[in-house]
Image (cartoon, rainbow, N blue to C red):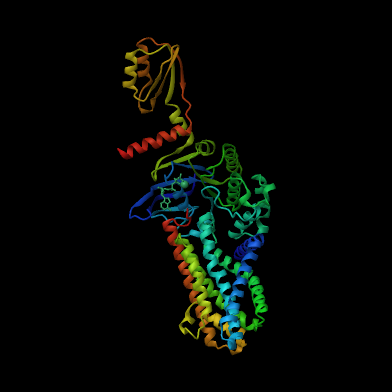
């Protein structure tokens, strides 16, 4: 019950802020849309014309996942940095629920809210490119959920680093490109990336959305990798976050003044 | 009386940035706070007040020493200990500036596991008590500094925890708002049966609100006593003696020898002598000196000291010890 209240409070806060700063939210969506238009034009002009359709579809999926990764992994870094500067991080740390539970609620809340934005962006980009992907929710949802769990793990790592490192901004900016790299590089090019967080998931979703693979066609082995990935990265991420929190409490880093 | 907070031999040092040196922020600090008591943690800048408060709040891990809150060790059972306390740290930095007054109260309640419905009545009551009702839908970044501070205290009250810690609650407030915040705190103490620790270097806060004060300087406790006792102790020993006419040169010299700390202000009609008897000096010795020219004593007034002077004396005295 307490956990539910925690989740509710954090969802409400995220929602209120998104709504109150609607112009900002819209501007951010617009920027992302323009970015897509840029990539789409790029394919039209430089790409191999015979592979154009597949390339475009490929970019749409990658682009949507890049946005998701930014919202889940990168955003929490900025949030922690700002809250440390504002002084609210200390208030969160004093919650008897524990900071990590608040962070999980925040991650769930931002993901849920950004889901609506993602759907808008997805359909907007499909419309712009006139390429219709296979939105097979039955196949997508289980993959997406497992992928999100490993993304949360990565988010926790970024949050942890943001607690103990004061000049984190530059790192977070570079991270945006790393995330782009992880979402854009196909697994066939670098098979070892399957053991990186969320790369395998994006690859499977590409299979579903571009090649029309159905849930039953995806092997248990693939799901196994996804599940192990989710458990390992979430556990590692959380452990690392708790470790960073501990260091911060030893060195007095919870407020960056 | 039973202690709700027991702070035992706390030590904390910070590493200085870009050097191998350490700052000893808190050294061997121990004190107890009784249930329902209001304690002033007093000290000059950099004394270690915030460090001490943050260790009690579980935001800083001490290098050594223990803190028990309601008999719960705050390192071994951190979250459970946190349930017993709420705190407002340094000024108005504890709020979400993009949320309204009410949304802040709701959000922080949620973060402690309460639902909005559960705290609804309590929020209404606090908005009224803190005079924030007409501002409830105002964004926090549009509020004045004083209002923000009041809201931060209201947020701390919302948790219904037994212990409240306030770090510099009147810092940066103008005289009027400072007074208003003190009134609010006084009301909380009188009617809400909480245990409160206030860190401050605002003497008015200590003199107005606190029953007891722990004075800390350079990370160490210098004094731990009832405010009333300190006032009495110092007030009782400091006197202003008014005489008719002036002292002779010989008397002045004797006065200087016997009471080196005394001050003498000659005036044509009435002169005054201020003497502090706290160092074992005796009033009779003063009378002996005055008797030499049969000086007429017009009045003996016990000096009224305010807490500021006491504080300065204690802190200065301690620094003198430390450097000697
Ligand atoms: N996070 C930190 N890292 C390094 N040194 C610190 C840190 N926090 C405090 N200090 C140092 O520790 C000492 C005690 O600081 P503290 O903030 O506890 O004092 P204070 O009594 O609250 O002072 P003030 O009245 O200025 O708020 C000071 O010398 C301060 O410079
Ligand atoms: Mg301080």
Taking the view exactly as shown, the residue that stands out farthest to the left is B324
Q: Does residue B6 sit above or below B229 in this rendering?
A: below
Q: Residue at x 68, y 78 (%)?
A: A127
Residue A176 at x, y percent in the picture: 51, 70
Work out which residue is located at the far top of the displayed protein and give it: B294
**Nearer the observer, A64 or B281:** A64
From the viewer's perspective, is B123 left or right of B321? right
Which residue is more in the foreground, A117 or A47? Answer: A47
User: x, y (%) of residue B312?
Assistant: 42, 35
Residue B260 % position (x, y):
34, 24
- Identify the residue shown where x is 51% and y is 60%: A81
Look at the image and tell me whether residue A232 can be seen.
yes
Q: Position of residue A77 (x, y in %)?
A: 51, 64
**What residue appears at the point 33 percent right and 40 percent down from the top-left corner?**
B322
In the rendered view of the protein, which quadrant contains the C terminus of chain B?
top left
- Give the answer, above or below, for where A82 lies relative to A203: above
Residue A98 in sight here: no
Residue sitting farthest toward the front: A45
B126 relative to B117, above or below: above
Given residues A224 and B96, the one toward you in this image is B96
Question: How many labels sit on residues?
Answer: 0
Closer to the camera in the image, A31 or A24: A31
Residue at point 41% right, 47% down? B30
């Amino acid at each position: 019950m307490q956990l539910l209240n925690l989740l509710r409070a954090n969802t409400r806060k995220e929602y209120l802020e998104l709504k109150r700063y609607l112009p900002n939210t819209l501007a951010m969506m617009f920027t992302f849309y323009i970015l897509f238009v840029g990539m789409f034009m790029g394919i039209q002009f430089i790409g191999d014309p015979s592979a154009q359709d597949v390339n475009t579809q490929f970019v749409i999926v990658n682009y949507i996942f890049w946005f998701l990764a930014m919202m889940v992994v990168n955003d929490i870094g900025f949030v922690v940095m700002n809250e440390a500067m504002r002084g609210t991080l200390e208030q969160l740390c004093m919650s008897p629920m524990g900071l990590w539970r608040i962070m999980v609620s925040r991650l769930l809340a931002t993901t849920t809210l950004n889901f609506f934005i993602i759907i808008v962006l997805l359909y907007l980009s499909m419309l712009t490119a006139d390429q219709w992907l296979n939105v097979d929710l039955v196949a997508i949802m289980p993959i997406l959920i497992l992928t999100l769990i490993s993304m949360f793990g990565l988010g926790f790592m970024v949050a942890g680093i943001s607690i103990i490192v004061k000049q984190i901004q530059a790192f977070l900016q570079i991270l945006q490109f790393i995330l782009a790299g992880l979402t854009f590089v196909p697994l066939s090019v670098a098979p070892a990336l399957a053991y990186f967080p969320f790369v395998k998931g994006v690859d499977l979703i590409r299979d579903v959305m571009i090649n029309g693979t159905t849930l039953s066609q995806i092997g248990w082995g693939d799901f196994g990798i996804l599940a192990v990935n989710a458990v390992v990265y979430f556990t590692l991420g959380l452990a690392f976050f708790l470790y960073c929190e501990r260091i911060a409490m030893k060195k007095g880093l919870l407020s960056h003044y | 009386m039973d202690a709700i907070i027991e702070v035992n031999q706390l030590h904390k040092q910070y590493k200085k940035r870009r050097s191998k040196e350490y700052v000893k922020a808190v050294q061997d600090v121990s004190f107890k706070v009784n249930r329902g008591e209001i304690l002033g943690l007093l000290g000059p800048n950099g004394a270690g007040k915030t460090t001490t408060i943050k260790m009690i709040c579980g935001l800083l891990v001490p290098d050594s020493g223990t803190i028990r809150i309601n008999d719960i060790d705050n390192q071994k059972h951190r979250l459970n200990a946190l349930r017993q306390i709420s705190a407002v740290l340094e000024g108005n930095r504890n709020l979400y500036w993009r949320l309204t007054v009410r949304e802040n109260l709701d959000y922080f309640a949620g973060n402690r596991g309460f639902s909005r419905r559960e705290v609804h009545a309590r929020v209404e009551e606090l908005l009224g008590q803190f005079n924030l009702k007409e501002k409830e839908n105002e964004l926090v970044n549009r509020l004045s500094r004083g209002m923000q501070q009041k809201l931060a205290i209201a947020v701390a009250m919302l948790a219904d925890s037994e212990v409240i810690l306030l770090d510099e609650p009147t810092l940066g407030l103008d005289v009027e708002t400072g007074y208003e915040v003190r009134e609010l705190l006084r009301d909380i103490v009188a009617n809400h049966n909480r245990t409160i620790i206030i860190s401050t270097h605002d003497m008015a806060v200590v003199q107005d609100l606190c029953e007891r004060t722990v004075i800390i300087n350079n990370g160490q406790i210098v004094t731990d006593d009832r405010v009333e006792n300190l006032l009495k102790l110092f007030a009782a020993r400091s006197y202003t003696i008014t005489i008719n006419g002036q002292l002779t040169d010989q008397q002045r010299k004797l006065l200087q020898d016997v009471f080196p700390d005394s001050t003498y202000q000659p005036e044509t009609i009435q002169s005054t002598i201020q003497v502090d008897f706290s160092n074992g000096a005796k009033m009779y010795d003063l009378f002996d000196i005055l008797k030499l020219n049969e000086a007429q004593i017009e009045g003996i007034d016990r000096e009224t000291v305010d807490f500021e002077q006491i504080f300065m004396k204690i802190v200065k005295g301690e620094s003198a010890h430390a450097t000697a």
